[in-house]
Image: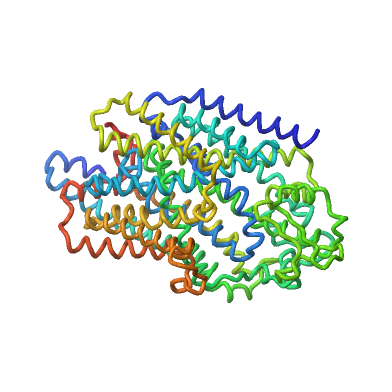
Amino acid sequence: MSVQTWTYIIVGFTFLIYIGIAIWSRAGSTKEFYVAGGGVSPLANGMATAADWMSAASFISMAGLISFMGYDGGVYLMGWTGGYVLLALLLAPYLRKFGKFTVPDFIGDRYYSQAARTVAIVAALIVSFTYVAGQMRGVGVVFSRFLEVDINTGVIIGMALVFIYAVLGGMKGITYTQVAQYCILIFAFMVPAIFISIQLTGNPIPQFGFGDTLVNSDVYLLDKLDQLSTELGFTAYTLGQKSTVDVFCITAALMLGTAGLPHVIVRFFTVPRVKDARTSAGYALAFIAILYTTAPSIAAFARVNLIETVSNKEYSSMPEWFSKWETTGLIAFNDKNNDGKIQYVKDASINELHIDRDIIVLANPEIAKLPNWVIALVAAGALAAALSTAAGLLLVISASVSHDLLKKQLMPNISEKGELIAARISAACAVVVAGYFGIHPPGFVAAVVALAFGLAAASFFPAIILGIFYKRMNKEGAISGMVIGLLSMILYIMVFKFNFLGETTSEDWFLGISPEGFGTIAMLINVVVAVVVANFTAEPPKEVTDMVEEIRYPKGASKEIIMH
Amino acid sequence: MNEHSTNEKKNPEKEALATSLSRKRYWQNNLKYLGVLLGIWFLCSFGAGILFKDTLNEIRVGGFKLGFWFAQQGAIYIFTFIIIAYIVLMNRLDKKYDVQDD
């Protein structure tokens, strides 16, 4: 059977599963809509968190990025997993004990202030919208490549699907759909990785194959890769070229951002007990680690395969996948010296091959000549990754509007039923806005997704940590910290990413820190400002310090679950 | 625990003081665990994977240079173990100080 037929079968089948689950787990109350009723098992919550977290970027782009970055790719690997340590140890148990629906809920109550709540809502919306726009575009790209429809049609199919389970099912529908999506995406990621690991190194476990010798030789894969890279003028694969301070700051910003992303934090409100919040953070990281330790292996395998297939080979002898991807424009060959061979080197004046980083995972099965059903499976996995993250983000947006803005600020007397309707309407509107950004992507989407982490790191993370561990922190401190942290991050992005004040180069960066890594500095600014301001203003009221004292002890969390 | 319950009947004030003292100890223990575990977290990611990677790269394990391995795989395994250790330690601590959630 052709790839096309297989794709229709496998993708169609997974969609049926998602819709079936959505109908089965419809939300009937706001509590079910926002936090799935607070009764999700830690194992299911761990899987849902993993799917929620692993987006189109993790599934499609990350291995490709690492493949071209070598050692420097470690910033994503450590950054996007190390944040879970912070989440599990510093945030999840306390937020669960606090027991409300959303992050702005915590900030608003802890800092006894509607202004703090509003700042948190604005930050949650900025972070979620920048992130979701990238996801919808990813959905469109995958559809267009594998179902051979127009990108816009792809985005609309994705919108319709997310609409069904986010609007109908709320958090409850999303949670169980995400469990299914996790299973599909991890299976789809592992199958080609295992095949390729066996082909290249004879070792069936990609994590170990990565450090193994190549089949029929006693040269280690990574040594071979270092040698191939340096021969072509690239930096050795295992060394990387970013400065140490930048690698340090980007890794830290991604960790702090991960721990501050509202759609991840909210998942820890959905389990019954404090103990379960800790356990589910553990499950989540273990499930994520399966993909994240496989990705660098895939990156190295694909890099070796790619260089050996194309470097100095006749253009006419290229395999079928090469020409297939050429038609999408993601691979481009320009025979500068007219010798009919492909020169793939670092030096831009001689280099004749352009390869888009995003094709590495998608083209991997074809490059390794795997059967057609594997290719279709990868398409289904990529869609699962993009859709699950989009749904989680849409829910944060809808809860921010219906719960934090309407119920907590504008219409405190709204009935439970009215709030549920408002939640559904805002989810529906958010789907439409996300779809619009998917169809008309603002040019900066790709650049901004990574920066969403910087924004999360600069705003939420310090406010929550200080709220739990520093009783003396008051509303004046928290608000000024969040505002100045957020503004300094936005300013840095504007100046150095979008050249707001004239052309800039990496030489102009503050201490050599890239905009991606600046979240770390903005986070520090936030903390310093918050602590200084707090110590010059009034102490927080006694009932607030009592509340902070109370959330430090797990006892009683399951009883006092969220009754509004 | 038994002596607490007998105290409760006789002297509620003393009992409240005992609870607050034991809670304080619980929290200090918790902070100690956090310090140690986050220390390990920092050492194996920012330390081994970034700051000292050039030195560690001199050491080879199979096909891996050690610094590179920490940055691309090792740190992630250790992160998972840190969370598991935290879960075990805290569950034990919750029980010891009778603050577990039932």
Q: Quadrant of the C terminus of chain A?
A: top left
**Is residue A166 visible in this depiction of the protein?**
yes
Above-or-below relation of A534 to A115: below
Instruction: Give the total number of marks visible in the rendering.
Output: 0
Q: Nearer the viewer, residue A363 or A251?
A: A363
Q: Position of residue B43 (x, y in %)?
A: 48, 67
Q: Nearer the viewer, residue A235 or A297?
A: A235
**A537 left or right of B73?**
left
Q: Position of residue B2 (x, y in %)?
A: 24, 42
**A189 left or right of A447?**
right
**Is residue B40 visible in this depiction of the protein?**
no
Q: Quadrant of the N terminus of chain A?
A: top right
Above-or-below relation of A179 to A259: above
Q: Nearer the viewer, residue A467 or B94?
A: A467
**A224 left or right of A172?**
right
How is the rendered protein coloured? rainbow
**A527 left or right of A513?**
left
Q: Position of residue A330 (x, y in %)?
A: 70, 52
Task: Tell me what residue is drawn at x 12 percent, y 46 percent.
Answer: B13
Above-or-below relation of A62 to A142: below
Task: Tell me what residue is drawn at x 70 percent, y 39 percent.
Answer: A146
Task: Tell me what residue is drawn at x 47 percent, y 69 percent.
Answer: A513
Q: Which residue sits furthest front?
A: A502
Task: Tell me what residue is drawn at x 40 percent, y 42 percent.
Answer: A266
Q: Splitting the image into 4 quarters, where does residue B29 fall?
A: bottom left
Q: Position of residue A15 (x, y in %)?
A: 61, 30
Above-or-below relation of A466 to B57: above
